[in-house]
Amino acid sequence: MDEETIHESRESRSRQALATYFRRIARALGRGEPIPVDDAGTVTIDPAAESQVEIELERADGTVHFEVEVEFDETEGAVDADAAASKATFELYADSADQWRWRLVHDNGNIIADGGEGYVDKRDARSGIESVQRNAPGAHVIDAGRDEEPPAEGGSEAVFELFRDKADAYRWRLRHENGNVIADGGQGYASKQKAKQGLNSVKSNAPGAPVDELDGDGAAEDDEE
């Protein structure tokens, strides 16, 4: 019997990161949506209505192996190794002050997030993008105006804060646990619901969004880094 490895990855994750990953799987299962195999969602599976599940716990040479395996007939499910991971693109560019900035632009042309500050070093701007890609999907959402606190369990290393500005418009910002704001919506919304829709778009589109570096004329260059 021929076997094909479609995707394989191995990395260290915190308990919190594990909770975020499994929560994404559970949410997709509950909604009947394809399940993201990788963090970017470039590989997905759509399992059969009923699948075989094998759970195995082993201990050998001081190491514990906990494996969850889901098996289904390929004709009853689907695998997409080239899934549309995002409907947005990160644009990395230098502003008029020669500072590096980024913005997340939806396919419809709308800017749905930006970094809110300039960076002297392009590498720091890229690190800011990577932090948003890593933290946005699992970040809890709280109402800062009500002094809400995020749940102690799950989530990521950042939190989406909803708040009202001086013009009484609703806004959101993504604040890292170190206190830094790593992204914001860049605009005010007439309602809290609209602000939530804006940040949910970032949650779903940021992880797999490609990065285009813009030249001095605002045109995209090939991203080879």
Image (cartoon, rainbow, N blue to C red):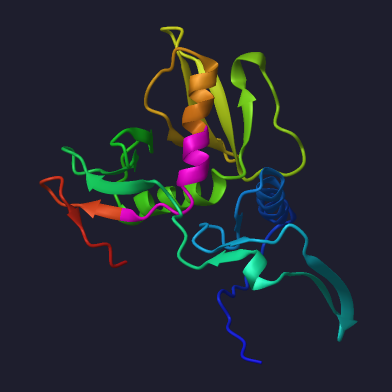
Of the 4 image quadrants, the one containing the N terminus is bottom right
Q: Is residue 209 above or below residue 187?
A: below
Residue 202 is a magenta residue: yes
Q: Residue furthest front?
A: 75
Residue range highlighted in magenta: 200-211
Q: What residue is drawn where x is 82% and y is 67%? A: 53
Residue 160 is a magenta residue: no
Asked whether, in this view, residue 185 is left or right of residue 174, the answer is: left
Of the 4 image quadrants, the one containing the C terminus is bottom left
Q: Residue 112, can we see it?
A: yes
Where residue 154 appears, as percent x and y from the top left, is 73, 44
Where residue 176 appears, as percent x and y from the top left, is 56, 40
Q: What residue is drawn where x is 49% and y is 61%? A: 42
Asked whether, in this view, residue 43 is left or right of residue 215, the answer is: right
Nearer to the camera, 46 or 130: 46
Q: Residue furthest left?
A: 217
Where residue 20 appears, as percent x and y from the top left, is 68, 50
**Would you identify the image quadrant in which residue 64 lies?**
bottom right
Q: What residue is drawn where x is 15% and y is 52%? A: 215
Q: Residue 116, can we see it?
A: no
Q: Is residue 63 above or below residue 83?
A: below
**Would you identify the image quadrant in which residue 82 lies?**
bottom left
